[in-house]
Amino acid sequence: MRPIGVFDSGIGGLSVLQALQAELPHERFVYLADTGHAPYGEKSETFVRQRSLAIAQHLIEQHHIKALVVACNTATAAAIHVLRSHHPQLVLVGVEPALKPATQLTRTGRVGVMATQGTVGSEKFQRLLASMDPGIHFEVKACNGLALAIEQSTLPAHASPAQAQVGQLLQQYVAELGPFGPQSGHIDTLVLGCTHYVFAQEQLQQLVGPGVRLISTGEPVARQTHRLLQSAGLLSPQAAPAHAHGRVALYTTGDLEGLKAAAQRWLDLPGDDCRAAVGV
């Protein structure tokens, strides 16, 4: 049974992997965290494109993947078109900030977007933003340092200071975006435009208040992956094992202990499912 490949600059894409596992319980997954080259959001488009191509090639050659989910907004913006041209036969799914769902949910007509500089500054995001209903106002914030702080908060050696930094950055960016709430003129819908930010969702909800809807991309991406695999006749049979252990392999180009801690914390997966990525 050929697996589905999933990659991100670090542990943020685990939020997408979580949704994929729920949507496709009979599939196998190979997840690659490019932590050794993170964060993508503050790197050049050329660099992110080169890393995306190298990772895709590695997953195809070493793991014989049947589909690839680019579980990173920055990598999708920089590289999804290049990946499609290099691998036209591969089922490819990218992620993008959920602006369109936000326009359908907002009641005040004001939507906040938190994303990396790499996403916010990309042509792909600007085109997406320009295509939205002109009656909806989007307040967009490039949250420099937040993805890296969330990443480092999973490392045992850096957990406490990194968690404190996450809290400080969230307060700063929420204050700069706001005001939030269901009242007229306030932001009532907040788009999490980086997969890392999902892991700070509880803290964000406390800061913006219960009347604000937070939107991430995991579930829509999982549904799209299901649809494309079904259309291509590549879905695994229902008889395939549905238990998580053994059907997910996780690799990292960086700190292995950090990936183990994140997998245990957010996916309830044992550390022996995590390995160092070699040759990528």
Image: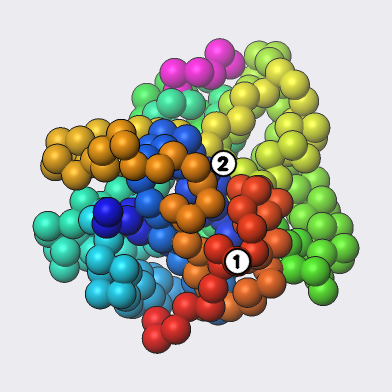
Residue 144 visible? The answer is no
Q: Compared to 167, does 11 lie above or below?
A: below
Q: In this view, does 216 lie above or below 40?
A: above
Residue at 44% in and 53% down: 247
Question: 174 or 87: which is nearer to us?
Answer: 87
Q: Tell me, for residue 186, which label it has, or none.
A: none
Q: Which residue is drawn at 82% across and 74% down?
A: 157
Dividing the image into 4 quarters, which one contains the C terminus?
Answer: bottom left
Q: In which quarter of the image is the N terminus?
A: bottom left
Q: For the image shown, how many numbered marks are present on the structure? A: 2
Using the rendered image of the protein, determine whether residue 43 is visible from the camera's viewpoint.
yes
Q: Residue 272: which disc? A: 1
Question: For residue 52, which quarter of the picture?
Answer: bottom left
Tag 2 residue:
192
Q: How far apart are marks 2 and 1 (CA)?
A: 30 Å
Residue 88: where, in percent of width, then height?
12, 59
Q: How crowded is mark 2: few (under 14 residues within 10 Å), some or many (20 or more)?
A: many
Question: Residue sitting at 77 percent across and 55 percent down?
Answer: 166
Badge 2 or badge 1: first in the primary sequence = 2
Kindly state the secondary structure of the residue where label 2 is placed: strand
For badge 2, the amino acid type reads Leu
Mark 2 touching mark 1, by CB under 8 A? no
Q: What stretch is highlighted in magenta?
A: 103-108
Residue type highlighted by circle 1: Asp
The colour style of the image is rainbow
Q: Foreground residue, 66 or 44?
A: 66
